[in-house]
Image (spheres, rainbow, N blue to C red):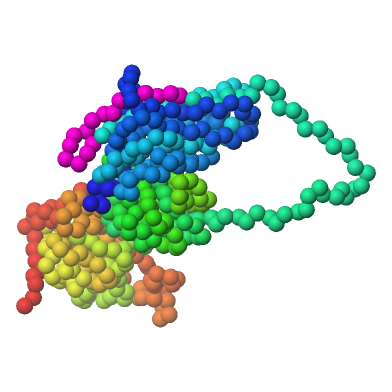
Amino acid sequence: MKKFLALLISAMLVLGLVAIPAAAEGEVTFTAATVNDVNPGDTVSVDISIAGEYAAHGINMDINYDPENLEVQSLTNGPVFANRPEDAMAVKDYTTVPGAVKISVICPTDALTGEGVFMTINFKVKESCTEDQPVTITINEFYNFPLGGSQTDIPYIVENGSINLAETEPTPTPTAAPSDDPTPTPTTAPSEPPVEPGVATFTVGSEENVPGGATVEIPVSLAGDYEAHILNAVINYDPAVLSVLDVEIGDIVPEDAFASIDYEHRTPGTIYVGIICPTDGITGNGDVVTVTFKVADDFDAPTPVTLEVNEFAYMPDTEEEPIEFQIVNGEITPAEIEPAVFTMESKYGVAGGSEITLDFTLEGDYEAHTLYANLVYDPEVLTVNNVEVGGLIPEDAACVIDYETNPGVISIGVICPTDGITGDGVIVTVTFTVCEDFTEPTVIEVEINEFEYMPVGASNGTPIEYVANNGIVTPLGDEPGPSDEPGPSDEPGPGPQPPVTGAASLIGLGILAIATGAGVAIFRKKED
């Protein structure tokens, strides 16, 4: 039932986009009153009346005026509108479209009947107004639709009205003669300063440090001293960055409120929120709605979530009173993740002909499902004896190692079908034999050709930012000093240091390229 009511409200709010021509003759008459002898700056009330016999289940009308010369101050329900059936749903809107007051009533069971004033529009005539102003009525829908029956349009006629300016110039107010008393006595006693009404604050939630592909909940909350029976608002977001998964009504909206939420049939990047409270209004501090967004996988820059409030009013009886408000918009910011760090271990002061074991490690805040790397060395100086997969690689990962196809290159390929590589640890451990006449330092270079996040269900991987530190092996006599062991923030010792490589360009090499030669392949298998 709530969904049905929400759809009805949504329908009422979009009615009037196409006007239906009025019948030439009819028993029912809609009349806009004419008001005479009005001066610029005056506030005048124009009655919209209905006369005749009818039983209407739907009325949708526009009252049109020139917004350059007239400004709507408020709407006052007439007896006909105020005495509508208890389960009727009504919408009044004079802020969304300048120059049009939109009024709609839908009666799901009992019909609306009666003659008299339907609605009173309270205009202020602008000081710049110099001519009479027409007030016209456009009937978009007027029908009978009883339960179990079919919709039948009700014939009607329209009599438009106007606001006519006074023919004589207003009498100027005489200027009082200046007083000799520098402190004139006020003619009336000073009154107490007016009490400022409460100002409600709408706050759109913000979320920081959000990784790409994540789901976030952004509340739109209200706080302050207020009571609202009508809310008509739009939430704006960037549809290229955010997609809406769900919108839930918040805890401060009364249970019997009529709520219309629409993000599927509107302009992309907008969420319409319409709430009408027939009895108790929205009040207090809490959430009006909560939007669940999914962030794009490549989310890398802050994106705003903003609110537009078109109508926010208090209406306990028949007259709508706008509520003063302010808006604090929100923002979703991406996670600030440091690049992952690949490091090839170094060895200093190595004797010729000896065997050394070096770790190729990875550390940082990341999750990788594909890795393709090369460790490039001088085959005349170093000979690979063995390569063992390290504990960082998940047990169910497919891992291929090749160090025989291309002398001087150890190719490493890893694909993780479920859990990715994450955390700090060893990718592989390499055992080398150093040549007998080892006298000059030799560098082991790290090349990263593919390093991506691609969870189950994804069709494309997302590259992960990284830096790569090369390794170096030095002969006897080229050791760092006892307190100068090189590190991330220390000054290097006397021995030569390995160069550091930046993030390598992705060259589109797949893991299958590793296994095309006749080298040795090692597959990591789950241990019993």
Picture coordinates of residue 256, whole percent (x, y)? 32, 56
Picture coordinates of residue 28, whole percent (x, y)? 35, 27
The image quarter in which residue 104 lies: top left
Q: Nearer the viewer, residue 265 or 206?
A: 265
- Say above or below: 232 vs 475: above
Residues in magenta, as a range: 145-160
- The residue at 28%/47% (across/down) is 6
- Is residue 464 rendered magenta in the image? no
- Is residue 153 rendered magenta in the image? yes
Identity of the residue furthest to the top in this view:
24
- Say above or below: 443 vs 57: below
Q: Is residue 253 in view?
A: yes
The image quarter in which residue 145 lies: top left
Q: Nearer the viewer, residue 363 or 496?
A: 363
Identity of the residue furthest to the bottom in this view:
482
- The residue at 45%/50% (across/down) is 317
- The residue at 70%/24% (across/down) is 169
- Say above or below: 154 vs 286: above
Picture coordinates of residue 42, whole percent (x, y)? 62, 34
Image quarter of the C terminus: bottom left
- The residue at 24%/50% (across/down) is 3
Give the side of residue 526 with respect to residue 330, left or right.
left
The image quarter in which residue 199 lies: bottom right
- Say above or below: 119 vs 400: above
Q: Is residue 504 in view?
A: no
Picture coordinates of residue 81, whole percent (x, y)? 40, 41
Q: Nearer the viewer, residue 50 or 296?
A: 50
Give the side of residue 188 with respect to residue 102, left or right.
right
